[in-house]
């Protein structure tokens, strides 16, 4: 997994895991980014594909003041709070 600054396109954080599901990678990456906030500045948004989308991840982003954006993928879209993270 990697976090990239959208202005400079530089990789600012990385992570490796044995987890079989991308949804489980958001919280560890948010924690990594929070430890670097003094250097990186505030994290304003998360942009990720649909495999990272879950209500738990949306809530975690919003609790930190981060706006989550998820790409719509093929198949059924999530409902509830997670569905609101699919923004144009």
Image: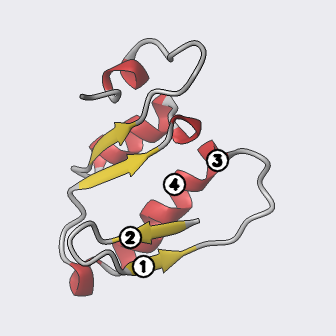
- Give the numbered dot on residue 71: none
Evaluate if marks 3 and 4 touch, with contact meaning CB atoms under 8 Å apart. no
The quarter in which the C terminus is drawn is top left
Evaluate if marks 1 and 3 touch, with contact meaning CB atoms under 8 Å apart. no
Q: Nearer the viewer, mark 2 or mark 3?
A: 2
Q: Residue 16's image quarter?
A: bottom right
64 relative to 17 in the view: left or right: left
Task: Compare marks 4 and 2 and give the one earlier in the sequence.
Answer: 2
The Cα–Cα distance between marks 1 and 3, rounded to whole angstroms, is: 18 Å
Task: Compare marks 1 and 3 and give the one earlier in the sequence.
Answer: 1
Count of numbered tags: 4
The Cα–Cα distance between marks 2 and 1, rounded to whole angstroms, is: 4 Å
46 up-or-down from 56: above or below: below
Task: Compare marks 3 and 4 and give the one earlier in the sequence.
Answer: 3
Task: Compare marks 2 and 3 and give the one earlier in the sequence.
Answer: 2
53 relative to 64 in the view: left or right: right
The percent coordinates of residue 52 (x first, y second) are 54, 42
Secondary structure found at label 3: helix
Q: Nearer the viewer, mark 3 or mark 4?
A: 3
Q: Residues within 10 Å of mark 3 (few under 14, many from 20)?
A: some
Evaluate if marks 2 and 1 touch, with contact meaning CB atoms under 8 Å apart. yes
Q: Residue at x 58, y 21 (%)?
A: 74
Circle 4 residue? 27
Circle 2 residue? 4
Circle 1 residue? 11
Q: Residue 6's image quarter?
A: bottom left
39 up-or-down from 19: above or below: below
Q: Residue at x 42, y 24 (%)?
A: 82
């Amino acid at each position: 997994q990697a976090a990239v600054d959208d202005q400079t396109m530089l990789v600012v954080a990385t992570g490796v895991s044995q987890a079989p599901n991308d949804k489980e990678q958001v919280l560890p990456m948010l924690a990594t980014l929070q430890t670097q906030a003094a250097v990186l500045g505030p994290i304003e948004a998360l942009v990720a594909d649909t495999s990272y989308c879950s209500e738990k991840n949306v809530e975690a982003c919003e609790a930190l003041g981060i706006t989550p954006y998820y790409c719509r993928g093929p198949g059924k879209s999530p409902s509830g709070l997670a569905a609101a993270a699919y923004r144009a």
